[in-house]
Amino acid sequence: MPPFANSSTITSLRRTSVGASRDFVVHVLREWQLTDLIDDIELCASELATNALLHGVPPGREFAVRLDLTDDLVRLAVRDSGDGRPEIQHPDESSCSGRGLFLVGELAADFGIDHHVVGKTVWAAFKRPPAP
């Protein structure tokens, strides 16, 4: 497993983009031998990619998914060119949506939003398991 690494992919605006984002995350985490983190990071990638697809990317543009590996963290980042301001929602029990950022906040050690001149990056950091 490398001590430091990064990998990224650009995803177009199609319904299959969320699945492609999940596949990318699973592939990279397996390559990095971090299989213990797959379930949580795959779910968060799905939520953040869905948000980018539904709320963040203007028509005709794409979003990017990136994973970064440091000594103690894996950082998932989804960047889009939209100007929306993501916020944790508090939906009622009967709502079918609105829980994505809440789930990310519960699963990740930390998460946040970096605003850019054009667009934003929503990121989540996960503690890297100790080496055997």
Image: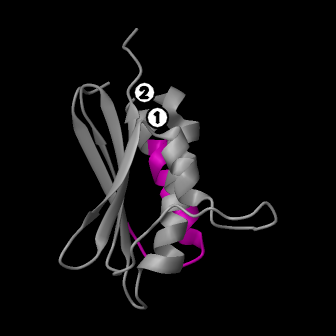
What amino acid is at disc 2?
A: Gln
Q: Secondary structure at mark 1?
A: helix
Residue at (51, 49) in percent of width and height: 104
Q: Residue furthest top?
A: 132
Residue at (68, 67) in percent of width and height: 97
Q: Using the image, determine if residue 14 lies above or below residue 21.
A: below
CA separation in Å, label 2 and label 1 = 5 Å
The residue carrying pointer 2 sits among few (fewer than 14), some (14 to 19) or many (20 or more) residues within 10 Å by Cα, namely: few
The spot of residue 19 in percent (x, y) is 58, 61
For residue 33, what is the image quadrant?
Answer: top left
Q: Where, quadrant-wise, is the C terminus in this rendering? A: top left
The answer to whether the residues at label 2 and label 1 have Cβ atoms under 8 Å apart is yes
The spot of residue 88 in percent (x, y) is 51, 61
Which residue is denoted by mark 2 in the rendering?
33
- On the question of residue 120 being in view, the answer is yes
In-front residue for pair 49/27: 49
Q: Where, quadrant-wise, is the N terminus in this rendering? A: top left
Boundaries of the magenta span:
10-27
Asked if residue 72 is among those painted magenta in the image, a careful observer would answer no
Q: Using the image, determine if residue 19 lies above or below residue 54.
A: above
For residue 2, what is the image quadrant?
Answer: top left
The residue carrying pointer 1 sits among few (fewer than 14), some (14 to 19) or many (20 or more) residues within 10 Å by Cα, namely: some
Q: Residue furthest right?
A: 94
Which residue is denoted by mark 1 in the rendering?
30
What amino acid is at disc 1?
A: Arg
